[in-house]
Image (spheres, grey):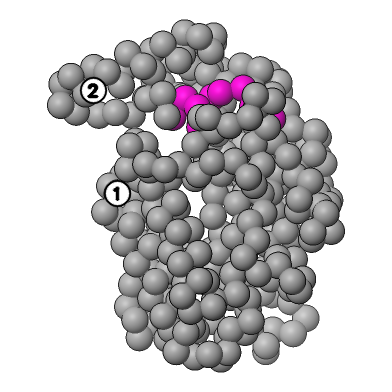
Amino acid sequence: MRRASDLHRLKAALAETDNLAAVHIVRGDLVCRDDARAAARDAAVVYHLAAGTGLKSHASAFMNSVVTTRNLLDALVEQGTLKRFVNLSSFAVYSNKCDNSANVLDETSSVEAQPQMRAEAYCYAKVKQDALVIDYGERHHIPFVLIRPGVVYGPGKTAIPGRIGIGTSRFFLHLGGSSRIPFTYVDNCADAIVLSGLKPGLEGEVFNVVDDDLPTSRQFLRAYKCNVGPIRSVYLPKSVSYFLCSLWEHYSEWSQHQLPPVFTRREWHAYWKATDYSNQKIKRRLGWQPKINSDEGLRQYFASCRKALARA
C-alpha cells in the first residue's frame, strides 16, 4: 500500500484475523519500480486492486492505473513465481453502444474502442489497463483473470451512484429511470475476487460481477428517499436525456471544448441506456453466488448513509 495510506481500517480488519503473524504489510508506491519488486517478491497469487480513482486528467489516471500495473507485471515476470494475476477492472470499460437487441450486457459485450472520447479518465485508464494485462498474458504468459464489478456498494459509501443521476446544489437530476443498476454488494464482490484467484483453469477469462434481483434506478431512488431522507429530484425521460447529451456533445465540439465534453452520447449509452445484466458466467465457472441479497444489502447501505448524514 502507499506510504501515506491510512491503516486504521486495515488494522481493524486484521485484528479479527486468527493468523495475524502470516500477514506482512509492504509500504510503497507502484510508480516506483523498486517498490513494485518488493511487492512482487515470491508472489504466487496477486490480487491487483490498486487504481487511480477520482482523478480528473487522463494523464494522471494513466500513470496511477496503467504505469503502476506495468511496473508490477514487469516485477512479476522477473520473479517467475506467479500462478495467477487477478486484475480488478470495471463495468466502466463497456461501451454498451452497439450490442445485441436484447440489451443484455455480459462478458461478450463490446469494450470502449475509443476511451479517450469518453469524458472519464477512469474509463480511459481501465480500458488501457485491461489491454496491458492481456498483452502481458500473450507476450509473457502471465496467467491472468479480469474481474469487472458493476456498482460496488455497501457501508462506507454514501454518494448516490452516477448511474442513478447527477446531484446539483438545488436538486437531484434523475437520469436512470427504469434502467436496472448493476449493483454488487461489497461482500459479494470480495467473494468473487477471492474465488477468481483460487479456482484452477481460468487463465485469460473475464468475469462480470453483479448481484441478483437488481433494482431499477427508480426503485433505488424511491427507497433512498424513504430510508435515508427526502431529496428533491427531477426525472428526465431517456429520449430527453439522450437529446441533451447529444446537444452538449455537439456544442462542446463547436466550442473546441471550451465546454468540456462531460455529457455525451457515449456516456449516455454506458450509464443511462436501459440495460439488463447477466451474472451467469461467474456463477457457472466460479460457483459464485451472492450471499447478501439486494434487500439486505440496501438495508445496510441505507443505514450507513443515515449515520453519515447524522454525523455531518
**Residue at (41% x, 11% y) in the render:** 243
Q: Which residues are magenta?
A: 267-276
Q: Which mark is residue 252?
A: 2
**Residue at (56% x, 23% y) in the render:** 273
Q: Work out whether residue 121 or residue 250 is closer to the camera in this orientation and state it.
A: 250
Q: State the image coordinates of residue 224 (x, y, percent, origin top left).
A: 66, 25
Give the vertical position of 20 relative to 214 (above or below). Answer: below
Label 2 Cα crowd, 10 Å radius (few <14 / some 14-19 / many 20+)? some
Disc 2 residue type? Ser
Q: Work out whether residue 134 or residue 254 is closer to the camera in this orientation and state it.
A: 134
Please say whether residue 7 is visible from this viewpoint: no
Give the vertical position of 56 relative to 98 (above or below). Answer: below
Give the vertical position of 257 relative to 41 (above or below). Answer: above
Label 1 Cα crowd, 10 Å radius (few <14 / some 14-19 / many 20+)? some
Q: Work out whether residue 197 or residue 99 is closer to the camera in this orientation and state it.
A: 99
Disc 1 residue type? His
**Residue at (46% x, 67% y) in the render:** 135
Q: State the image coordinates of residue 132 (x, y, percent, origin top left).
A: 43, 64
Element at label 1: helix
Residue with the mark numbered 1: 58
Q: State the image coordinates of residue 264 (x, y, percent, origin top left).
A: 37, 25
Give the vertical position of 198 relative to 129 (above or below). Answer: below
**Residue at (34% x, 67% y) in the render:** 67
Q: State the image coordinates of residue 158 (x, y, percent, origin top left).
A: 57, 39
Number of numbered labels in the structure image: 2
Q: CA distance from mark 2 to mark 1?
A: 18 Å
Is residue 209 found left or right of 118 in the rendered image? right
**Which of the two discs, 2 and 1, labels the residue nearer the N terminus?**
1
